[in-house]
């Protein structure tokens, strides 16, 4: 339904530009200098990992470089793409393995590297990339159709990811093998609708069927594949999302998964790869359907779950984030997580597996590239973040501090007629357009005529409120933000070398040790939001742009049995132990240690 703009047409501004610069100055812009799985990757002829990690990193690094117009980063991106292209054999195979290894090489990375090449093409405009992608997938078709290889492991569970490249080719080549490859992939791939019963009762066991990243990727499967396959779109994603969320949902729109589905407990975690892949699924779902629910869910993830799992300077990250996370200290024995290790929740270069180290980088750049989209002569502002669009005679500048402040100024110039639409979130109240009241119908629409210059001033209100959570707990939400009780902490730094990987400042490991009380419940329903302004770090853990004041009282919460750094799943007693206090709640993404799901106290 909608097309994405490229980094040549759409640029981030304001706080979003600040966030992307922080990312570039942190691990995203430097991973190839400090982490051997990228620096010494088999894709570059090195002896390190030769599968997903190098293309994972490029999938975020390339759009980040071009959005920032950073010539040094762009130069590196071009060099790395040239090295990948140089790997391609005459028959089209492009992955770094021998002929003997091909039948056992997990070809999910074919989908990933094709997506990376498409991203590079859209950023750079390099037409020589198109035949490279063609040869990659034609060779893949030849191998699959002849029976020389088949889908297994990750490729079987991520078969739909290939359709991003297949759609790209089908727009440029009218050749029957493209659809035939799609049919083979769907036939050999897993049907997730047959697995839903397994999602309702999570187990302490690792498997592909409940793997959280597979499932967040899966949400877009129908959206990206139905067109090429000639199938009717049924919104199957909503059916699957509802089941996952009912049995595994968190307040910030995630599903628990540490590393597989983990139920509704606020002390289970969610892998960072799942955050960025769920965001990407929502971006593709909104573009394919125009359904505003996907954009609203996308913003919920971007403004809460994504910043929560990264340190303020974006040099370090968590593998697992928890809704109620009172400490990030390595477990001395068995971890609370179902299948992850004892260090999965600390902040570092490579806590637990390195997949998140490689994959976290796509989150903010692809989000920025989803701010405006187009369909025919219609342009829609899908995500209400500060941006500037220049598209063949259409100039739109959006100045805003959203989501921290709900005021928007649009400046539009054009030499053509077009329809301009603005998505309005479902929670917006008292909408004003140039001072006039407007009804919330989900979007505003304007007919813009050639030669016009238009200014639009739009604002609306949001009100903090409680949402119900399992186990008789509550969470505070306002607009696209979830709010948490912040826990003060100190950092303990660890510098060391393990498996030839050096951790040293600023990309070493850190434990976050709590230094303030966290055993609270809400004492009344009065909530008040305050705006403080955006600092140089938009999601600062020390200077949050907004807070919500809440009346709270201490309770006897207690620790989970067998742990001294994990609060119990539910409080032992909800009776107030002391007098009422007024406490400032922080946005979830700003509170690195936090209590998010809490009860009302018994007075």
Image: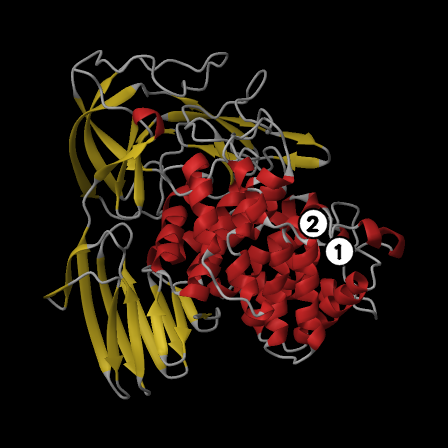
- Secondary structure under badge 2? helix
Q: Is residue 169 left or right of residue 107?
A: left
- Front residue of 420 and 30: 420
Q: What is the number of the mark on residue 198?
A: none
**204 relative to 529, above or below:** above
At which x and y percent is residue 344?
56, 30
Q: What separation in Å lies between label 1 and label 2 (alpha carbons)? A: 8 Å
**Dot 1 corresponds to which residue?**
44
Using the image, determine if residue 379 lies above or below residue 485: below
The foreground one among 163 and 325 is 163
Work out which quarter of the rendered image holds the C terminus and state it.
Answer: top left
**Mark 1, secondary structure of its residue:** helix
- Where is residue 21 shown, x and y percent of the image? 45, 54
Residue sitting nearer the eye, 219 or 493: 219
At x 32%, y 21%, the residue is: 518
Residue 81 falls in image quadrant: bottom right
Q: Are marks 1 and 2 in contact (CB under 8 Å)?
A: yes
At label 1, counting other C-alpha atoms closer than 10 Å, the crowd grade (few under 14, some 14-19, many 20 or more) is some
* Residue 41 at x, y percent in the picture: 73, 50
Up the image or down, 294 lies above or below 456; here it is above
- Residue 203 percent across, percent down from the top left: 57, 28
Quarter occupied by residue 121: bottom right
Instruction: Indicate left or right for 236 with 128 as reference.
Output: left
């Amino acid at each position: 339904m909608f097309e994405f703009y490229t980094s040549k047409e759409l640029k981030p501004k304001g706080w979003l530009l600040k966030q992307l610069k922080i990312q570039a100055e942190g691990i995203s812009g430097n991973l190839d200098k400090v982490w051997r799985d990228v620096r010494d990757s088999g894709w570059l002829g090195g002896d390190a990992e030769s599968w997903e990690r190098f293309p994972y990193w490029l999938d975020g690094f390339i759009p980040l470089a071009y959005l920032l117009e950073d010539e040094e980063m762009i130069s590196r991106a071009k060099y790395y793409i040239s090295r990948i292209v140089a790997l391609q054999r005459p028959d089209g195979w492009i992955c770094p393995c021998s002929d003997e290894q091909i039948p056992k090489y997990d070809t999910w990375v074919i989908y990933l590297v094709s997506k990376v090449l498409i991203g590079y093409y859209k950023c750079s405009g390099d037409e020589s990339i198109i035949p490279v992608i063609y040869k990659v997938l034609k060779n893949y078709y030849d191998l699959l159709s002849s029976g020389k290889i088949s889908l297994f492991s990750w490729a079987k569970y991520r078969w739909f990811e290939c359709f991003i490249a297949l759609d790209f080719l089908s727009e440029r080549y009218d050749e029957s093998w493209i659809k035939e490859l799609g049919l083979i992939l769907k036939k050999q791939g897993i049907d997730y609708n047959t697995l839903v019963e397994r999602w309702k009762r999570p187990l302490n066991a690792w498997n592909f069927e409940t793997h959280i990243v597979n499932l967040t990727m899966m949400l877009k499967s129908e959206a990206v594949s139905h067109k090429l396959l000639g199938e009717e779109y049924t919104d199957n994603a909503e059916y699957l999302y509802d089941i996952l969320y009912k049995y595994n949902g968190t307040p910030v729109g995630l599903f628990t998964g540490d590393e597989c589905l983990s139920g509704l407990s606020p002390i289970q975690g969610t892998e960072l790869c799942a955050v960025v892949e769920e965001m990407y699924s929502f971006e593709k779902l909104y573009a394919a359907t125009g359904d505003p629910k996907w954009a609203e869910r996308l913003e919920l993830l971007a403004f809460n779950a994504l910043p929560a799992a990264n340190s303020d300077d974006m040099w370090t990250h968590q593998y697992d984030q928890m809704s109620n996370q009172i400490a990030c200290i390595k477990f001395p024995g068995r971890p609370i997580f179902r299948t992850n290790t004892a260090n999965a929740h600390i902040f570092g270069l490579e806590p637990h597996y390195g997949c998140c180290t490689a994959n976290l980088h796509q989150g903010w750049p692809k989000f920025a590239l989803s701010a405006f989209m187009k369909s025919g002569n219609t342009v829609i502002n899908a995500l209400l973040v500060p941006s500037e669009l220049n598209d063949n005679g259409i100039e739109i500048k959006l100045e805003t501090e959203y989501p921290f402040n709900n005021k928007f100024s649009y400046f539009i110039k054009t030499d053509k007629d077009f329809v301009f639409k603005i998505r309005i979130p479902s929670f917006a109240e008292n909408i004003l357009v140039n001072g006039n009241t407007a009804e919330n119908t989900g979007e505003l629409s304007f007919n813009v005529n050639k030669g016009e210059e238009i200014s639009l001033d739009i604002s609306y209100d949001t009100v903090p409120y409680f949402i119900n959570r399992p186990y008789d707990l509550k969470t505070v939400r306002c607009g696209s933000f979830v709010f948490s009780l912040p826990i003060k902490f100190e950092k303990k730094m660890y510098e060391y070398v393990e498996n030839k990987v050096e951790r040293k400042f600023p990309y070493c490991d850190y434990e976050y040790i709590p230094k303030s009380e966290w055993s609270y419940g809400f004492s009344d329903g009065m909530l008040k939001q305050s705006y403080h302004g955006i600092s140089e770090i938009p999601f600062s853990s020390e200077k949050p742009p907004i807070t919500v004041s809440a009346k709270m009282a201490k309770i006897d919460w207690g620790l989970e049995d067998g742990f001294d750094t994990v609060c119990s799943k539910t409080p032992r007693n909800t009776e107030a132990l002391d007098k009422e206090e007024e406490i400032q709640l922080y946005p979830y993404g700003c509170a690195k240690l936090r209590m998010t799901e809490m009860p009302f106290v018994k007075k």
